[in-house]
Image (cartoon, rainbow, N blue to C red):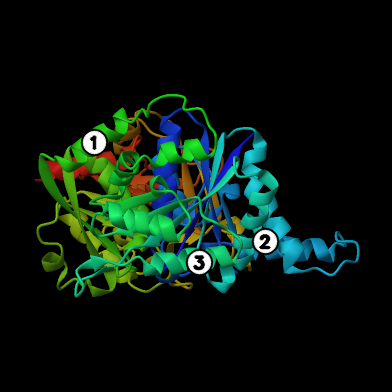
Amino acid sequence: MTKYIFVTGGVTSSLGKGIIAASVAKLLQSRGFSVTIQKFDPYINVDPGTLNPYEHGECYVTDDGAETDLDLGHYERFLNVPTSQANNVTTGRIYLTVITKEREGAYLGKTVQVIPHITDEIKRRMLLLGQTGQFDIVITEIGGTVGDIESLPYIEAIRQLRWELGNENCLVVHLTLLPFLAAAKELKTKPTQHSVKELLMSGIQPDILVCRTEHAITADIRRKVALFCNLDSSSVIEALDAESIYDVPLMMLKEKLDLVILSKLRLVDRSEPKLTAWKNFLGKLKNPTQVVHIAVIGKYVELQDAYKSISESFIHAGAVNECRVKVSMIHSEHITSYNVAEKLKGMNGILVAPGFGERGIEGKIVAVRYARENNLPFFGICLGMQCAVIEFGRTVLGLSDAHSTEMMLKTTSPVIDLMEEQKQVTQKGGTMRLGAYDCAIKKDSKAYNCYHKTGISERHRHRYEFNNAYLTQYETAGMLATGTNPDSGLVEIVEIPSHRWFVGVQFHPELKSTVENPHPLFVGFVKACIGDK
């Protein structure tokens, strides 16, 4: 029977439930168990696709085209296993399903209520992945914090499942905070006690407490927390602030969190954790032989989670190259032709990030021109690739008003235009070109030298594309389409062969980079930046 682990949080948000869930999954996977993780978010949006990155960080996209929470990126980066539509569920999706069924008459005239109808739908989705027969263990992270009004139906659903499945098949890991008061010079346990009390009031006794802390937990504090939260001391786990999120699995291994879980779920330990590749990665990450400086030009740079997957991809690629990548986030609205040289001074490479809308677009185009004219390694992703096309059209081809119809509907040189199938779309949510699509790569290209194959599949999230009416003109002038979709002819990759390293891609390579499989384009770009030094 599939075992279920629920990860909840208390005291405050942003404690790192996703990292703890991914770390637990990694440890169990390394012991030979088949594990998956899912995220249940309490907001009413059906998915985060229509949310501003300032609101919720980046929108992560899966192979099957689901727009999901960024925590799914952590799951994939840690487990090296792709997620899907089923791995992220929101309150909006739950209610949409229940209301649709009510409209269809599925409830036979009954009054539709939060209990049992909403909680039944939550439970159905919580068990869905476990019923496929693919997984020994399903870990479910509950967004928000215990005590939030929005989270109550999820907590109630867990309470019911614990009764239905039994304690040996289901456990709750609760993440809390042990704050350190500088004036008192001690850790305080009361916030954790209140958090557990809140859970108890909802009918749930946590099985394991993971305590985030800035300072080591003494044996006395561990016993105190265990006593007042109805646990044995071995079930109180210390989670010290880590230098890197990739240290957390080894820290949890040291705390024997995986062994406590196996004991409580009555699972036979299959083998010692096999974490050789993980430790090798950490060894290279912490012992770089050199440093490169890369500028990421974007317009959501104030929030680090807005470009989370790009930041993590640089960590993976840097480790492969035994190099520390120092990323400088530069706001595209602050870049002009007058200050670009000063803004990008000392940079070994430039990445122009994805995004939507007109704001900051001219700063991105200026940065592209600087990279192209100064032979500086350049990498453009989605809108970044489109900016490269616009800049080349204006500067090299002489198309003075070359632009994307997303920003300038009536341009006479629409080098980037709305995809044909998007022209009749009126709804916003889940209607872009989403998910994995094939790309055929030409040999003797930078992309081929990175992938070492002519056929790839990458994830997309866009509405606009390179306008193929201009393709011959571009290729004659020196910007080549080295990757195209074999079915639609959509240009996926553009390069300038005469440049040291100038690559723009319509897809999102950062969404497929993991610790064990760093993305080849990021690896190649970082290598080119090292060469620039």
Task: From the image, tell me which residue sits under label 1.
Answer: 320
Badge 3 vs badge 1, beta-carbon distance below 8 Å? no
Residue ID at (69%, 65%)? 95
Given residues 180 and 312, the one toward you in this image is 180
Residue ID at (65%, 44%)? 166
Residue ID at (60%, 41%)? 169
Task: From the image, tell me which residue sits under label 2.
Answer: 94
Q: Is 115 rendered above or below residue 137?
A: below
Given residues 372 and 254, the one toward you in this image is 254
Q: Callout 1, which amino acid?
A: Val
- What's the CA distance linking mark 3 and mark 1? 46 Å
Q: Quadrant of the N terminus?
A: top right
Lateral position of residue 45 relative to residue 96, left or right: left
Camera-nearest label, 3 or 1: 3
Most extreme residue toward the right is 109
Q: Callout 3, which amino acid?
A: Lys
Q: How many marks?
A: 3
Q: Is 128 rendered above or below residue 177?
A: above
Task: From the image, tell me which residue sits under label 3.
Answer: 197
Q: In which quarter of the image is the C terminus?
A: top left
